């Protein structure tokens, strides 16, 4: 993919399932309240990060392009 992505987790929506941590180890972590957060706000674009966003049971993960802000996930309907 070669790009960078800006990754955010909506902590008001996150239920702490840990699916993102399991699907993209190193890209996400759970804090002491079991709330997910990205390891860094901007990550290398990769299939595991996208898979984690797609696998989030409450769709709490949003991925955008840092330059321009185009949405990568969730897709615009």
Image (spheres, rainbow, N blue to C red):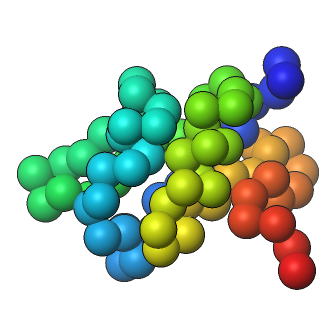
Q: Where is residue 36 in the image (x, y as percent from the top left)?
A: 33, 53
> In which image quadrant can residue 55 be found?
bottom right
Q: Position of residue 50 (x, y in %)?
A: 66, 43
Q: Does residue 60 show up?
A: no
- 30 to the left or right of 22: left
- 28 to the left or right of 1: left
- The C terminus lies in quadrant: bottom right
Q: Does residue 73 show up?
A: yes
Q: Name which residue lies at 63% across and 56% down.
A: 54
Q: Is residue 17 above or below residue 26?
A: below
Q: Name which residue lies at 68% across and 52% down.
A: 63
> In which image quadrant can residue 39 be found?
top left
Q: Which residue in the rendered view is the most extreme toward the top? A: 2
Q: Name which residue lies at 76% across and 43% down.
A: 66
Q: Name which residue lies at 87% across and 56% down.
A: 70
Q: Position of residue 48 (x, y in %)?
A: 60, 32
Q: Which residue in the rendered view is the most extreme toward the left? A: 32
Q: In this view, does 31 lie above or below 34?
A: above
> In which image quadrant can residue 4 be found?
top right
- The N terminus lies in quadrant: top right
- 48 to the left or right of 16: right
Circle count = 0
Q: Where is residue 76 in the image (x, y as percent from the top left)?
A: 86, 73
Q: Which of 27 and 65 is in front in this view?
A: 27
């Amino acid at each position: 993919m070669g790009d960078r992505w800006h990754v955010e987790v909506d902590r008001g929506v996150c239920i702490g399932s840990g699916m993102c941590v399991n699907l993209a180890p190193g890209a996400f972590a759970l804090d002491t309240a079991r709330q997910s957060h990205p390891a860094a706000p901007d990550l290398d674009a990769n299939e595991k990060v996208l898979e984690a966003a797609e696998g989030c049971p409450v769709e709490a993960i949003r991925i955008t392009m840092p330059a321009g802000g185009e949405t990568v996930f969730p897709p615009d309907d």
